[in-house]
Image (cartoon, rainbow, N blue to C red):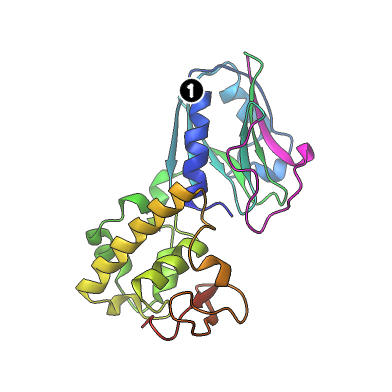
Amino acid sequence: MPEIIEIEIYRRQGEAMLGRRIERVVADDDWFLKEGATAEAVAAVCEGAVVDAVRRRGKLMLVDLSSGVTLGWRYGMTGRLLVDGAAEIEHLEYSSMRNEPAWDRFVVHFDDGGSARIRDPRRLGGVSIDPDESALGVDAFDAAPAVIRDRVAVGRVALKARLLDQTRIAGIGNLIADETMWRAGLDPARPAGELSPNEQRRLATHLRAVLDDFLRDGGSHTGRLQDHRVRGGVCPRCGTTLDRREIGGRTTFSCPQHQS
């Protein structure tokens, strides 16, 4: 499923759009247009414009156009980016193994004959015009210990829920959160404000390590815990049966032996 890692891969792939002029867009799925965007409004700001920049904040990919407008591209759980017919990520965890052009929800055609498209079987992503970037917290790649201290390690909310709160740190999803807390030895149900300074630093260190490892290995599903995140799964570190709980609205796996 796309978390910050997949979107960073898409952002890098999207650099192939830089400097190219948009001839037309196909945005005929009204459900996929978000925050008041319409097919007519998207066409008006896109057609004839050049792609000036491709950025990312958390799970949101941002496409800056020479028309002065920024498009926000969200990929949901099952969205993939294809540029000129090629995809950097062929399949996503928890998505269909099929690859159907009928699932193309938003397509940009360039005047050189190429294209960029979001292919999303479940239509859980979306495209918006000038999204509110300020609504997102610090990008997860920039989550230094001081960010963890000020934005995560506060209050009585469960640590897992804090990590998933995109207004505090943007980009962390379920798989990254579970892997990070497992490596850091922290119970996801603990009140976030109870973390000691040492635990805060440990969390920040392991979060960055997880992000770097996942990016190097090609996706958020590449963690050491991932294959064991099933009913009856055991901790790959000590062999203890993992706890399976609902925390922060998400299914959560953790080791009762070494996560406290």
The stretch of residues the image draws in magenta is 86-111
Under mark 1, the amino acid is Leu
Q: Quadrant of the C terminus?
A: bottom left
Q: Is 89 colored magenta in this rendering?
A: yes
Instruction: List the single residue furthest toward the top.
Output: 112
Quadrant assignment for the N terminus: bottom right
Query: Which residue is identified by label 1?
Result: 18
Q: Residue at x 70, y 39 (%)?
A: 105
Residue 208, placed above or below residue 152: above
Residue 214 in view of the camera: yes
Q: Residue at x 67, y 43 (%)?
A: 32
For the image, the number of numbered tags is 1
- Answer left or right for 102 relative to 7: right
Secondary structure state at the residue bearing disc 1: loop
Q: In percent of the image, x 57 and y 67: which residue is there?
A: 227
The front one of 236 and 182 is 236
Residue 108 drawn at (x, y percent): 64, 27
Determine whether 67 is above or below 251 in the image. above
Q: Position of residue 53 (x, y in %)?
A: 44, 27
User: Residue 135: percent from the left, percent from the top?
Assistant: 41, 51
Nearest the eye: 150 or 114: 114
Q: Position of residue 52 (x, y in %)?
A: 45, 23
37 left or right of 63 in image:
right
Q: Decide if residue 250 is in sight here.
A: no
Residue appearing at x 54%, y 66% in the figure: 226
Crowding near the residue tagged with mark 1, few <14, some 14–19, many ≥20 C-alpha atoms within 10 Å: some
Tell me the chief SS of the magenta region.
loop
| Residue 38 on the magenta span | no
